[in-house]
Image (cartoon, rainbow, N blue to C red):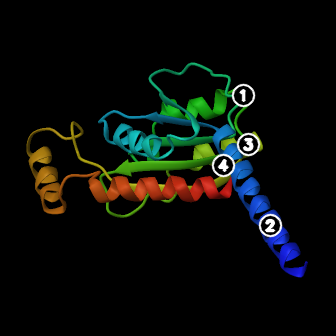
Amino acid sequence: MKNILTRFLNLTNLLSVNHYQILCENEHTMMKILIAFYTSTGNTKRIALSMKKVLENYDIDLLEIDDYESRDLSGYDLIILGSGVYLGVVGDKLIELVRNALNFPPKYACFYSCQSKEPYHNCFKPIKEAAEQKGSKYLGEFHCLGEPFNYYSGEEYVEAQKKFDELGFHPDKKDLENAKQFILDIIKQV
């Protein structure tokens, strides 16, 4: 009898664990995520697409921002905001999206690519301020190098290209893998 009872308890425990895992998977599947980004070179879009690819089991939308239109973001549990860095700050269209958005999601994270090996620690400051006013919780930030496409002209471009030739093309495969890991780590926080 004790042996039968032990098997029953083990089976019940196993079913409970499996049921819990199914509930957790369904909960994450139900999570609605928006990746909103601004890009002028295509670097940020490559990162956004890489993140979306790893989140294929989630309800996820991708939004490339190309205007200053106000948007209703109701229904999203998480927003991932991406941009290049322009003169030390992210794109103004992304900043305006956050400032003017209706029903901003309760949690957000950020990513950017830039032409500097050193991170721009304050480039998301206007976004963080606007999101904080909307009561949204900041979860983290990712950055990587980006390729200099059309910011320089003439001799400046040649010099910038030499610098980047030494570093290699970015975002590269490793950058995109790091972006995928970043987004998976963010999901664990939600």
Which residue is tagged 2? Answer: 13
Residue at coordinates 58% horizontally, 40% vertically from top-left? 58
Q: State the image coordinates of residue 90 (x, y, percent, origin top left).
A: 46, 43
Horizontally, residue 112 falls left or right of residue 36, namely left
Frontmost of labels 3 and 4 is 4
Classify residue 169 as left or right of residue 10: left
Q: State which quadrant residue 31 falls in.
A: top right
Q: CA distance from mark 4 to mark 2?
A: 18 Å
Counting the numbered discs, the total is 4
First in residue order: circle 1 vs circle 2: 2
Separation of marks 3 and 2 at Cα, in angstroms: 34 Å
In the rendered structure, which amino acid carries the disc numbered 1? Ser
Please name the amino acid that badge 4 sits on.
Glu
Q: Secondary structure at mark 2?
A: helix
Mark 3 residue crowding within 10 angstroms, few (<14) / some (14–19) / many (20+): some
Residue in the picture at 75% in, 42% down: 133
Q: What amino acid is found at the position of numbered circle 3 in the picture? A: Pro
Q: Nearer the viewer, residue 139 or 156?
A: 139
Separation of residues labelled 1 and 4 (CA atoms): 22 Å
Q: Between tags 3 and 2, which lies in front?
A: 2
- Disc 4 target residue: 25
User: Which mark identifies residue 65?
Assistant: none
Identified by mark 2, the residue type is Asn
For label 3, the residue is 106
Q: Earlier in the sequence, mark 1 or mark 4?
A: 4
Kind of element beneath mark 1: loop
Q: Nearer the viewer, mark 4 or mark 2?
A: 2
Q: Secondary structure at mark 4?
A: helix
Q: Residue at 53% x, 55% y: name it.
A: 184
Which is more N-terminal, label 1 or label 3?
1
Q: Is residue 122 visible?
A: no
